[in-house]
Amino acid sequence: FKLGKYDKDKGEVVTNPDAKMADKNLRKAMAMAVDRDTINKKLQKGLSIPLYQIIPPMFSTIYDKDYQGIKYNLEEAKKLLDEAGYKDTNNDGIREDKNGKPFKIKFASMSGGAIAEPIANYYIQQWKSIGLDVELTTGRLIEFNSFYEKVQADDPEIDIYQAAWGTGSNPNPTGLYGRKAQFNFSRFSSEELDKIFDKINSVEAVDKDYRAKAYKEFANYMFENVPVVPTLFRKGIVAVNNRVKKWDITPGSNFGLFDVELTADSPVK
């Protein structure tokens, strides 16, 4: 969700309390309207893992496998919107804003493979089912480079966006969600979140129990405030011939071709 802008002069994120998507119950309702299992099974062919917390499962020492997160629940989503003041005042099936005015949400999504458009359409369909009028920014999917240029520039035509990120061996989220991070594209910040990052980046975090507790605090805070919604953790498939030894795709392994060993002169068939 776009919740502010990046102030280049200050070198920090400035969150706007009056942003279109500022109400966290609106954000939570939109999260509840999306069934990750449907996306995974019907569109991703089972090659993704539905993700309900901000910590990827590959980091087993800080990932909570029992974490519930925001689950699919259309009726609860509708109830949240009602309570937040987003109501259908003219009985056309689409909710107005808290002041009874038309409420349209601009959604930026990238072009790409064969399922990029079906996934974007699924999101829009689900949000319409809870009474929200959502349309694609520019009216179509956006080419990869143009997409990130618009997102990073805080294009006013983007209220929400669907993006991806990857990580190496260090799960530290400060570079993606910190107040000073240009890659904090949602532009969400708070003093409480600053304090959590201080804990994650402290000397005390060398202790694994302290570190795990700090990361859990971060996950809970992001769950409660919903600046972003984790959706899917992707699996990758790498084909390696049987004659190859020591091929390592583990994040942070510093793997290089000089590490590879071959057990035969020609490929195993």
Image: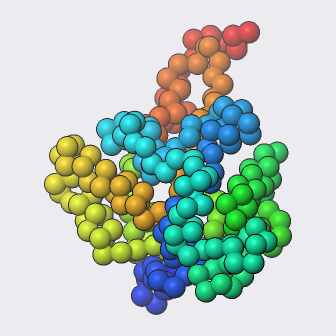
The location of residue 159, given as percent across then percent down, is 64, 74
**Residue situated furthest bottom in the rendering:** 9
What count of labels does the image hold?
0
Q: Residue at x 69, y 78 (%)?
A: 89
Considering only vertical position in the picture, is 261 above or below 14? above
| Camera-nearest residue between 98 and 165 | 98
Q: Nearer the viewer, residue 173 or 103?
A: 103
> Is residue 178 left or right of 242 when viewed as pictured?
left
At x 63%, y 73%, the residue is 87
Residue 263 or residue 137, whichever sits in front: 137
The residue at the point 28 percent across, 63 percent down is 196
Q: Left or right: where does residue 88 sit relative to residue 211?
A: right
Q: Is there any visible trace of residue 210 in the rendered image? A: yes
As drawn, is 8 to the left or to the right of 211? right
* x, y percent for residue 47: 65, 33
Q: Quadrant of residue 76?
A: bottom right
User: Residue 21's spot in the image, x, y percent?
Assistant: 56, 74
42 lies above or below 190: above
Query: Residue, x 59% and y 53% (percent of image)?
Result: 75
